[in-house]
Amino acid sequence: MSRRCELTGKGPMTGNNVSHAKNRTRRRFLPNLNDVTLQSETLGRGVKLRISASALRSVDHRGGLDKFLAKAKDVELSDNALKVKKEIVKAQAAEA
């Protein structure tokens, strides 16, 4: 399982551990990923995703998963999230 957020595309970064003596060794900064089930109002069911904590706050800020995915760029989304986005768009088109 890759260490990449399914909604924002946030992944590992690299940097240095710096000791008091200024010795530098390489290290990785991993994103804070959580397994969550987000509710979709349009689909009427939950969707399991592995997203970062900052993405979870962004979903809450935008007003839910449906509204977040409507504004999200397809390039940043994972295959699973892209499939859910297409299902939501299809359900909204059938509803209207």
Image: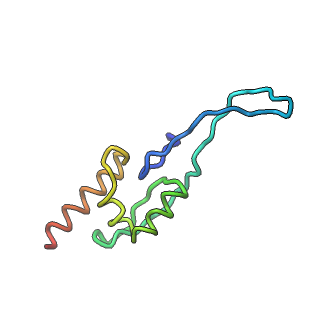
The picture places residue 93, in percent across and down from the top left corner, at 15, 66
Residue 20 lies in quadrant: top right
Q: In this view, does 65 lie to the left or right of 25?
A: left
How many numbered tags mark residues here? 0
Which color mode does the image show?
Answer: rainbow
The answer to whether 71 is drawn above or below residue 27 in the figure is: below
Q: Is residue 91 left or right of residue 19?
A: left
Residue 28 lies in quadrant: top right
The answer to whether 37 is drawn above or below residue 30 in the figure is: below
Quarter of the picture containing the C terminus is bottom left
Q: In this view, does 7 lie to the left or right of 90?
A: right
Residue visible at 14% across and 68% down? 94
The picture places residue 65, in percent across and down from the top left corner, at 38, 65
Residue visible at 39% across and 71% down? 63
Residue visible at 48% across and 57% down? 55
Between 53 and 2, the one nearer to me in the picture = 53
Between 93 and 59, the one nearer to me in the picture = 59
Q: Is residue 24 left or right of residue 39?
A: right
Between 63 and 41, the one nearer to me in the picture = 63
The answer to whether 80 is drawn above or below residue 53 in the figure is: above
Residue 85 lies in quadrant: bottom left
The picture places residue 73, in percent across and down from the top left corner, at 32, 50
